[in-house]
Amino acid sequence: MAWITEQKNTLALVFYLLAGLAYLHFMARRTAGSYGLASVLFLLALGSKTATVVLPAALVIVIW
């Protein structure tokens, strides 16, 4: 039963990390497709769990 309640955390983590990687790919290549993919993945992560709202702040720290 515990794995059912933790499923949203796992799903949010996957989308969170993929959004971060897609954004870093966007920073390297500056293509609209990479930015769109990062945005969609971020919205999916946000839909999975609202705690992922800190991704933009985390990316600013990583890039800085």
Image (tube, rainbow, N blue to C red):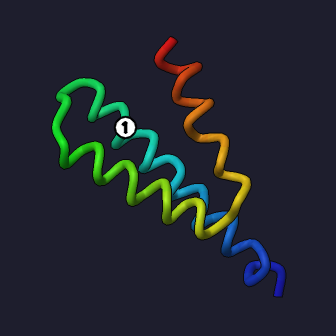
Residue situated furthest bottom in the rendering: 1
Identify the residue under disc 1.
23
**Taking 36 as reference, is 57 above or below it?**
above
Horizontally, residue 14 falls left or right of residue 9, namely left
Residue depicted at 54% across the width and 23% down the height: 60
Position in image of residue 45 (x %, y %): 55, 60
The x, y position of residue 28, in whole percent, is 24, 24
Q: Position of residue 62 (x, y in %)?
A: 53, 20
| Residue at 50 percent of width and 47 percent of height | 17
- Asked if residue 5 lies left or right of residue 27, the reply is right
Image quarter where the N terminus lies is bottom right
Asked if residue 52 is positioned above or below residue 4 in the image, the reply reads above
For the residue labelled by badge 1, is the local secondary structure a helix, a strand or a loop? helix
Vertical side of 11 occupied by 3: above or below: below
Q: Residue at x 30, y 53 (%)?
A: 37
Picture quadrant of residue 46: bottom right
Q: Residues within 10 Å of mark 1 (few under 14, many from 20)?
A: many
In this image, 1 relative to 13: left or right?
Answer: right
At 36% from the left edge and 31% from the top edge, which residue is drawn? 24
Outermost residue toward the top in this view: 64
In the depicted view, which residue is nearer to us: 14 or 48? 48
- Is 10 drawn above or below residue 24 in the view shown? below
**Amino acid type of disc 1?**
Tyr
